[in-house]
Amino acid sequence: MSSSSALRTVLVVDDSAFMRKLVVDLIEGSGAFRVVGTARHGVDALAKVRALSPDIVTMDIEMPELDGLGALERIMRESPRPVVMLSGAATGGPNDPVLRALELGAVEFVHKPSGPFSLDLATVRDPLLAALHAAAAVNLRGVPALGSRAAGPAARARGEGAGPADHVVVIASSTGGPRALAEVIPALPGALDAAVVVVQHMPAGFTKSLAERLAAHSRLPVTEAQEGETLRRGHVYVAPGGRHLRIVRGADGPAIALDDSPPIWGVRPSADPLFRSAAEQFGAAVTGVVLTGMGRDGAEGLRAVHDAGGTGIAQDRATSIIFGMPQAAAAAGGVDHVLPLDGIARAIAELSAKSRAAPAPRARPVAAKGGVE
C-alpha cells in the first residue's frame, strides 16, 4: 500500500463545521486520499489552495464571503485542479448551480445530506470516494474555457411540428459531460435533419435542469425525454436520470421507451441500450458519439452502431476530461472518427446531411483529427 505521503491530497471546503468533520473522516477513513486542510468559505479556500496546493478540492456551493461557484471559477482560472462539488437537491431550471458548477469545470458533484439526523453515511461515502477517484484521473488540459455559445431560443429553425426522425444521433457522456455537452449541443445547426438523444450519467432530478440549461443556449429545442413520445427531427432529448432509454417503433414512427431495469456498468441511464436500439431501428442512419467519462459505457453500443452501417465518433484524448469511455469505444472497434470537442458538432451536421442526401455504404474506419472524410 502507498505511504500517506504518496496519497493524493484533498482540501475540504464547507461552512459547516459538522460537514467538514464528516467529509474529512470519510476521506481519511478510505485510506486512498489524505486531507491536507479545511476551509470555511470561498475566500478561505482560495488562500488554502495557494498555501497548501492540494491535488483535489471538495467544495460546498452555498457559503458566506464567497460561494462555491465564485471560488470554483477563481480556482479554475488561477490554479486549475480537480474540484468535486457538494450540493443539496437540484433547484431545477436552467440556472441550477450544480449544472453551472459542472460547466465551470467541476469534475463531479455529490449529494450533500440535509442534516445530522437524516445522515446515512454509506450513501455519502461511496459517491464521494467515487468522485474523488474520478478527480484523480482528470486531464486538466481537457478543461479549457467554455467557448462562445450559439444563439438562444429565438434562433431556432424548427419546433414541435417537425416530422418523425429518419436519422438519429446518439450521444454518451459521463464525467465532464455537462461541460462537453454545453459545447456540442449549442453548436448544432437549427436545421439539423436528425433527432439527437443524449445519455448523461446523472441521478434523477438533475437531467431536467441539464436539458433546460442546454435549451437556453441552443438553436434546437432540448427537453428531458418522456415515455412514448415520437422522436422528431431537429429535437434534442436528454435521458431522464435513473432510467434507461431505448428507441422502439411507435405508431407514428420511432419513439422513446423508458425502463427501470438494473444498472449497466453501474449506471442508469446507460448508453449501451440506447445505442443498440438505435442501430436496430435506424440501421446505417445512426451517428453515435462517445464523449468524456470514466468506464466503458457506450463502447459495445457504438460497436453495434458501426456494425449496422452507422458512424461512430469518439472525443479525442487531448480534449477529454477523462478519456476512459472514448478509449474503450475505440478499443471495441466502433470508432470511425476521433475528433476534438470543437469538431464534433460540425461532424454530426455533416454526417446527418450526407445521410439524408444519399445514404451510402459505410466507409472503412478512420481516425481523424478534424472534420469528416
Image: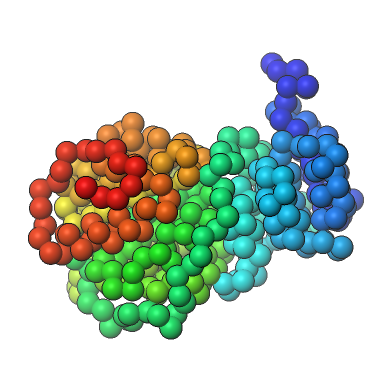
Coloring basis for residues? rainbow
Q: Residue at x 40, y 74 (%)?
A: 219
Residue 316 % position (x, y) = 41, 41
Q: Going by the image, does 339 lie left or right of 217?
A: left
Q: Quadrant of residue 345?
A: bottom left
**Taking the image as drawn, is residue 259 in sight?**
no
Q: Residue at x 72, y 36 (%)?
A: 55
Residue 185 % position (x, y) = 42, 63
Q: Residue at x 51, y 65 (%)?
A: 148
**Taking the image as drawn, is residue 99 in sight?**
yes
Q: Is residue 265 above or below residue 152?
A: above
Q: Going by the image, does 123 lie left or right of 281?
A: right
Which quarter of the image is occupied by the N terminus? top right
Q: Is residue 203 above or below residue 216?
A: above
Q: How many marks?
A: 0
Q: Is residue 51 above or below residue 100?
A: above
Q: Residue at x 24, y 38 (%)?
A: 366
Q: Looking at the picture, tell me which residue is in the foreground, 116 or 103.
A: 103
Residue 141 % position (x, y) = 56, 42
Residue 140 % position (x, y) = 59, 41
